[in-house]
Amino acid sequence: MSAMSDSETMTSPLHDRHLALGAKMADFGGWSMPIEYPGGGVVAEHTAVRERVGLFDVSHLGNALVRGPGAKDFLNSCLTNDLDRIEPGKAQYTMCCSEDGGVVDDMIAYLRSEDEVFLIPNAANTARVVELLQGAEQRPEDVSVENQHHDYAILALQGPRVDEVMDELGLPTGHDYMSFVEAQWQGVPVTVCRTGYTGERGYELVCASADAPALWDALTTAMEPLGGLPCGLGARDTLRTEMGYALHGHELSDQITPVMGRTGWAVGWGKDAFWGREVLTAQREAKECRLGGGLVVTGRGIPRAGCRVLDASGQEVGEVTSGTFSPTRKQGIALALLDRGTEQGTELVVEVRGREVPVEVSKPPFVEGGAAG
């Protein structure tokens, strides 16, 4: 996997594997990635993850290394969450905000030591996050920020039977949710993270790009007797929407702050400094902005991002940020920004292509997951 010009689409080190399987490919943040595979598509892949096990290629996600004396403290003065809450070997969900409170990106920070933190941002935002950290006024001269986007592949194994697949390969299992272990598989270094984006028990495996095809082959072979399936990013989206997980560009963005997106739990409000602190604190205290919520379709139809949400009188009370068909519930669901005071159980409508689709306000998650189990 080599870097390409901005005008060209980048490919995962597993690109040939996806093509050989007949995957339907699409652009994700400048990367050509699989949406779904033949033999059932999104619904079959979604169900495999909820009931058995599925394997995703998420190598489009970014990689950045912050290293040097005081690297953790430096990052803690920039990103929202408080790295002092965790110890080495733990991972933390956090956000990089602009000074006006908008979310540049959300990411996972892997704390290796006081002097080394590995970041996994979103594909399209990695370069911007790295540039902001590199240019930060408070960055010590001997703390480096390196964009390693093309050095690593990331495979996400998700579902209630993941441990059986991992055991087959001799990879470590059973460590705590949001922790990671440095391991080896056939002499190849693999970082085994108890993280994921599906709501199910799972592991995300980070390895060198060149080692990814052999690891992918071994995982697919091991999960086949369990009814496991390779899964595309279409199923990843339906799974995360059922759980109410935020997606940057939808539930969080330059215009949608952590307060609005209800990710304030990932903000270290007691910290002396982080980017956007003053604006976010003021917004939190003002209690005026719209807040993220959930909608379940009670009639027929599937809400989509950008659709208006109306009350019984036709007054706009919100906007859909993500919408999909829930394979688990077999009905339409949506995440939305709603006016404050919109209570659970309230009946509303969503304008979908000129038609009013009835919905009911429902707090996510829409299904029960087992991620922390």
Image (cartoon, rainbow, N blue to C red):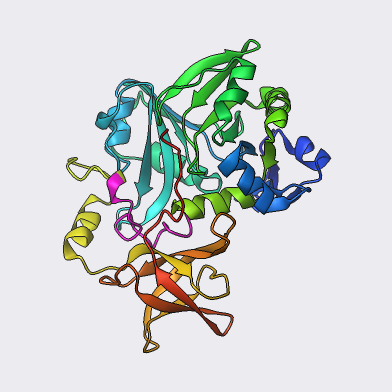
What residue is at 43 percent from the left and 58 percent from the top? 251
Q: Position of residue 274 (x, y in %)?
A: 26, 44
| In the rendered image, the vertical position of residue 8 relative to residue 339, given as above or below | above
Which residue occupies the extreme bottom position in the image?
Answer: 313
Compared to residue 346, the image places residue 335 above or below, namely above
Specify whether residue 256 is in view.
Answer: yes
Res 57 → quadrant: top right
In this view, the residue in front, 368 or 371, is: 368
Depicted 64 relative to depicted 37: above or below: above
Question: Percent from the top left, x then y, of residue 120?
Answer: 48, 36
Quarter of the picture holding the C terminus: top left
Q: With 77 as the anchor, is 112 left or right in this view?
A: right
Looking at the image, residue 236 sits to the left or right of residue 131; the answer is right
**Going 68% across and 24% down the picture, which residue do you hit?**
215
Magenta segment range?
247-265
Query: Does the magenta portion include 250?
Result: yes
Number of marks drawn: 0
- 202 or 8, which is in the foreground? 202
Q: Quadrant of the N terminus?
A: top right
Quadrant of residue 148 in the image?
top right
Q: Position of residue 14 (x, y in %)?
A: 72, 34
Q: Is 359 in the magenta?
A: no
Instruction: Tell me residue 12's x, y (percent).
Output: 68, 37
Query: What residue is shown at x 52% (from left), y 22% (from top)?
Result: 191
